[in-house]
Amino acid sequence: MLKVVHYINQFFANVGGEEMAHIPAELREGNVGPGLAFQQAFGDEAQIVATIVCGDSYFNENMEEAQKTIINMVKELQPDLFIAGPAFNAGRYGVACGTIAKAVKDQLNIPVLIGMYKENPGADMFKTSLYVVSTKNSAAGMRDAVKKMAPLALKLAKGEKIGASSEEGYMPNGIRKNFFDTERGSKRAVKMLLNKLVDKEFETEFPMPDFDRVAPNPAVKDITKAKIALVTSGGIVPKGNPDHIESSSASKYGKYDIDGVMDLTEATYETAHGGYDPVYANLDPDRVLPVDILREFEKQGKIGSLHRYFYTTVGNGTAVKSAKAFAAKFAQELKADGVDAVILTST
Amino acid sequence: MKLELGYIFIKDIQFAETSKVENGTLYVNKEEVKALILEDQNFKSADVELAKPGESVRIMPVKDVIEPRVKVEGPGGIFPGMVSKVETVGSGKTNVLKGAAVVTTGKIVGFQEGIIDMTGPGAEYTPFSQLNNLVLVCEPIDSLKQHEHEKALRFAGYKVAMYLGELAKNMTPDQVDTFETPTLVEGIKMYPELPRVAYVCMLQSQGLMHDTYVYGVDAKQTISTLIYPTEMMDGAIVSGNCVSACDKNTTYHHLNNPVVHDLFAEHGKTLNFVGVIITNENVYLADKERSSNWSAKLAEYLGVDGVIVSEEGFGNPDTDLIMNCKKIENKGIKTVLITDEYAGRDGTSQSLADADVRANAVVTGGNANEVIELPPMDKIIGHVEVADVIAGGFDGSLHADGSITAELQVITGATNEMGFNKLSAR
């Protein structure tokens, strides 16, 4: 049977309200307060072996000491899962649940689960690092909270695969996960529109991110002296794609030496990009990575020089996060190599 | 405009001496189909295979999926402007071999086609695993360039689909559904109390084989315009796409546009489905601005209260999607968008290439970057070796036992942005 340790505050342990919030952490055998409902929901699959009760003021005012004590208690018990709360809309309780659960997860590597109301300050603090089940705003929602938390708790304890937030009941944590909904997308769209038209509540399936906009740098002062590098997301690579850059959703970029290369030809270069008809890019890769023109400009003194290396990847279906990581890395190299400006070509 | 769609339900497909439909079985004369394909001198050989639901079969690389239909009554023929004469379609009667499809395959670009598994986990992601498929394996002559190959294969698909559709011309359908769009004025009189809704259907038109055709015209040479939804059911819009398989609209999707069907289902009950605005996804900024200006202007002109906008593709077209959203919302018309996501294999990246606060009602077809495992199949129709280079595949995608580890992107129709599937993400 799986072993569970439960963390609750003084109020839910029936010790008292605000006047008893100063009590330090204590360990009790078996389940206490809301633990009974969890135990019933677990049935024979898991047992709450111990409950840790701690005053909310004590935890928040003696955070280091409290954490140390509780971590030692949990370490001793070696449970398969640590549950804290649910804290509903109690702010200090929510923060305590999140803080101690995160410490257990990070320090003891034990799966953890907490629950609270979406507007509890602890929700925003911990929803991207822990599974936080969304509950109602008061203890009247205990039954509903246990109903959502118990099955997810068992899954976590067993190390099973966790589905999307909407299926499992945890707050969206910024990690997009696929699942099969009950209706097809077009039907969901019609329903969403009907709600939006009459100003009824609707929930978007993809909340828009804060979009990252890049302000352009000031113009290059003297282009005739500038060292220019070529960087492309158009997938131009030496023939044969030696580093196997993917045709879509690239996991890497390439850096290639063009010292002495005056012109990219069909025989020596090609595109690895899977997002467009490659015929014209393969016939003359300069169409995507204009080495030939820059060599001419170099000779005519229109630019200072063309940088010895070009950097390349495939933009097609590549996550913004990956693209950002590539550029963060090679931008340092470009800087170190004294490159003054970059021509960035896309397709 | 009124169209009656007569469904003849197909439950099995078999090769036979004579092509015919009998008791729910589609019988196909293989040699006749091969001869039809080889009319085009761009093919040096052709083969035809069957793939039925539940069979241990993997089809790849898949280019297009086409549903066999035939015009029974009313003007024009299926695929007007492409194969049939450029008559206005969408009225009268059309028969459909429901449950059957023609699947075209071939290594055109190598990495811009997809996979259909007829069983196993991959089959759950593609609607085409549920169909009785006639798969065309056409090998091009050696000198054929990719865009010529694409065109030849596109026409082979239409011709075979029309050949099969013709078998149903004189049949009595198992079920008849009627779709009717009144004129704008009549519609308003009929349902004065209902919100007026239009559908903005974005067509892939980035070019270089990311093409869609409307009555035979390349969509990138069109300007946003109006079309009756029933015209789409007769093949007025077809796919000429070689692009990531998961979110391209195949010809099958255009014929069975789920937004059109679900809006018709509510028409006269909770909303007044006024019509369809088609708009493109060109790569030049001026084109994007012009086309989205026009889709917003047409929505305003139709006097609608709300629209559903469906995207095709990803990345570059995300900007068209957001422009359409912003400009239509700015007219005071409410929007719901259907898209899919490229959130990275771990799901933590920003999902779209563009965003706006006005896009506050979005339906997602799922994260196309999520990695899936496709077990080996007993039979492969096509070329399995493209697994490593197909969009969504990577070095080492294809394992020695024939299983494939790849991104969901590789599956034809998996994250469709017309909302054809139940897949979603959070």
Image: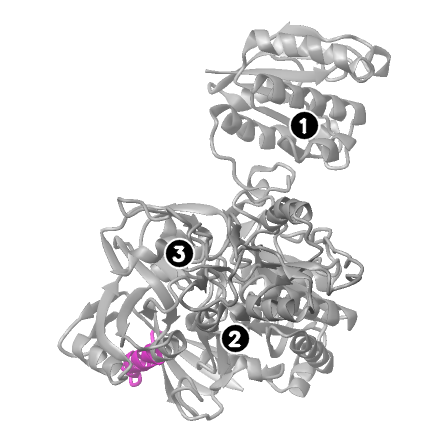
- Residue B173 among those drawn in magenta: yes
Q: Does residue A335 lie above or below B4 as drawn?
A: above
Residue B207: mark: 2
Left or right, B309 with respect to B172, comes to right
Q: Tell me which chain the residue with mark 3 is part of.
A: B
Q: Amino acid at mark 3?
A: Val
Asked which secondary structure carries label 3, the reply is loop
Asked which secondary structure carries label 1, the reply is helix
Q: Residue at x 62, y 32 (%)?
A: A131
The kind of secondary structure the magenta stretch mainly shows is: helix
Q: Which residue is mark 1?
A: A142
Look at the image and give the residue range highlighted in magenta: B155-174
Which badge, 2 or 3, comes first in the chain's sequence?
Answer: 2
The answer to whether one can see residue B42 in this image is yes
Q: Residue A258, how many percent across, how many down?
A: 52, 58
The answer to whether one can see residue B90 in this image is no
Q: Tell me which chain the residue with mark 1 is part of.
A: A
- Residue B287 among those drawn in magenta: no
Q: Does residue B305 lie above or below A134 as drawn?
A: below
Q: Residue B209, how many percent across, how many down?
A: 46, 74
Q: CA distance from mark 2 to mark 3?
A: 21 Å
Q: Residue at x 47, y 30 (%)?
A: A160
Quarter residue A130 falls in: top right
Crowd band around label 1 with a 10 angstrom C-alpha radius: few (<14), some (14–19), many (20+): some
**The furthest residue to the left:** B17
**Depth-wise, is mark 3 or mark 1 nearer the camera?**
3
Left or right, A18 with respect to B340, comes to right
Residue B389: mark: 3
Q: Amino acid at mark 1?
A: Met
